[in-house]
Amino acid sequence: MTRIRLMGLPGIEAGGGMARVLRGRKAWVLLAYLLLADRPPSRKRLAELLFADADDPLGALRWTLAELRRNLGAGVVLTGDPIVTTLGTDASADVLMLTDGSGDPATLLDLGGELLEGVQLPSCPEIESWLLAERHRLSSMIEAKLREAAVSLVASGQAKEAIPFASKAVSINPLEQGNHELLVRCLALTGDRPAALRQVAVCEDLLRRELAIAASPALLAASTVSPGSPSSPALSGRAAAMSQLEAGRAAIGAGAVDAGIQCLRRAVAEAEHCNDAVLRGRALSALGSALVHAIRGHDEEGAIVLHEAIQVATQAGDRATSVDAHRELAFVEVQAGRRSTAVAWLTKARELAETDAEYAAILGVQGMNSSDTGDYPAAFEHLGESVELATKCGNRRQQAWSLSIMGRAHLLRGEQSQAAATVQQSLELVRQERWIAFLPWPQALNAELDWYAGDLEAATDGFEQAWVLSCQLNDPCWEGMAARGLGLLSAGRGDDAGATSWLDQAATRSSREPDRYQWVHAHVLDTAITAALARDDEARARPLVTRLTALAARCELRELTVRANLHQARLGDPKAATTARHLATTINNPALTTLLR
């Protein structure tokens, strides 16, 4: 068996544990590139990336491929042009087990370090950029899988077994408050509240020192849960549970979030008390959805509740509840930019779905995920079908939601007329439904279209209305989008100080909660960089570009990765523009093509 280890210090183990050594750093980078490439790379492209400074670049590539074949043995085949890499049944690679979802989650605990730890190629700046992006992406993928394993164990009542997974997630990304909250919850559920409180203190100090922000109240709240205790005392049977469930849903819909959450917690407790598995699954799903959508900073608890809802619904044979919970977990992962786990939950949801309403909701989340990653053809396909099915079954809120994401995609592609028609339709549906909690999103999109059309008065009114309402709703995503728009208006008027102030607000607001929508935060950073570079403020732009580069790579925001490289080129990196052009070849966006030209 040949085992290829590329995470941490790279190595190859052949039969009997014998280590094989590759000569040269470029051989390791070539192996990683071949294994991780989206499609087989051409020999010409590889020679340009790795051996441009050699007298005979293609000859150097052939020699390095021969070196790989000698050390990898017959289990790994590298052949053709483009080069196709095939692993036989007697060969494995740790990075492929990550990307294809195979393997026991416990193997994640043994992974140490980043991709090709210690390997650098300063003479190949484009491959250095690729290596940096892949390190961020794979680290994020490991973190997502660790979190999913921990959440699943907690939902199954195995909090003690979840601790190593949560601890590893914290070590990989210690500045992500949600990882600390998950670990705190695991410790508290085992009965070790002192350890949970110590972890709260560690997180608070870290966030204050490194990010100058305070921890979310949800962090301390996680330390108060106790093992085996119901959410609320039981009431008086199934009728009471159903009553609490309906009351909770109605309260959430009316905006009385705190009262609604308490009703749903009581519904869960009462359904468990009267041993009604179907009702308990539905109550758990409703509670999990409310925690995810209705109150900020509670996605960690919401994910655990949704995992439990799936387990209960599956045992009870309640397909519909299982579909809802799978879709909601996918939504959480899409917002967080954890693509591999998002796709896994969406795939399971689609396999279980049967009704038009279920498919419409799932396709909406799929379209959002595709749009976030810059796959616009897939986004339009998913969102168009979602709107069609939502219209067919009379779900006007789903119609409005999917139309708004479609309008955003048209706006990003510079298709302003199509964007205006789509966003207007979404806005009308939102107002008809009196869906106040969602209104700032299409308002901000519509205001930006007014700005592009040169109607500054309408744009100002729209952005200000979105800002005031989003602040009343205390929604960081909507606040970030509205503040970004007000920053655009200030920049357009030549008010540099006002633009800087609003864009700082946008960046702070859009990232203040641990369960933020990462695309919005990255979009705001991109706008702030563009504004800074427009006035030649490189000192302000540079740290923002560093943040955007890392965030876009971690969350697989491909278009924003291209834009980050273009910003780097503006800041004097001669190879960044070449990298941007290469990365953009797989993104179908006319506006991006124009920008690259």
Image: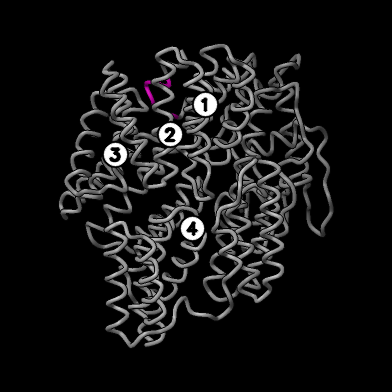
> Is disc 1 placed on a helix, strand or loop?
helix
Mark 2–mark 4 Cα distance, whole angstroms, equals: 28 Å
Q: State if disc 3 and disc 4 touch (CB < 8 Å).
A: no
Which residue is under mark 3?
A: 404
Check residue 591 for magenta coloring.
Answer: yes
Circle 4 Cα neighbour tier, 10 Å, few/some/many (<14 / 14–19 / ≥20): many
Which residue is under mark 2?
A: 374
The residue lying at 41 percent from left, 22 percent from top is 488
First in residue order: circle 1 vs circle 3 = 3
Amino acid bearing label 2? Gly
| 164 left or right, relative to 453 | right
Amino acid bearing label 1? Val
Q: Nearer the viewer, mark 1 or mark 3?
A: 3
First in residue order: circle 1 vs circle 2 = 2
Q: Which residues are magenta?
A: 587-592
Q: Nearer the viewer, mark 4 or mark 3?
A: 4
Q: Position of residue 133 (x, y in %)?
A: 62, 35
Determine whether 382 is above or below 324 in the image: above
Nearer to the camera, 385 or 11? 385
Indicate how the structure is coloured in the image. one colour
Q: State if disc 3 and disc 1 touch (CB < 8 Å).
A: no
> Is disc 4 placed on a helix, strand or loop?
loop
Mark 1–mark 3 Cα distance, whole angstroms, equals: 24 Å
Circle 2 Cα neighbour tier, 10 Å, few/some/many (<14 / 14–19 / ≥20): many
Residue 458: which quarter of the image? Answer: top left
First in residue order: circle 3 vs circle 2 = 2
Q: State if disc 1 and disc 4 touch (CB < 8 Å).
A: no
Which residue is under mark 4?
A: 298
Q: Which mark is residue 29?
A: none
Mark 1–mark 2 Cα distance, whole angstroms, equals: 10 Å
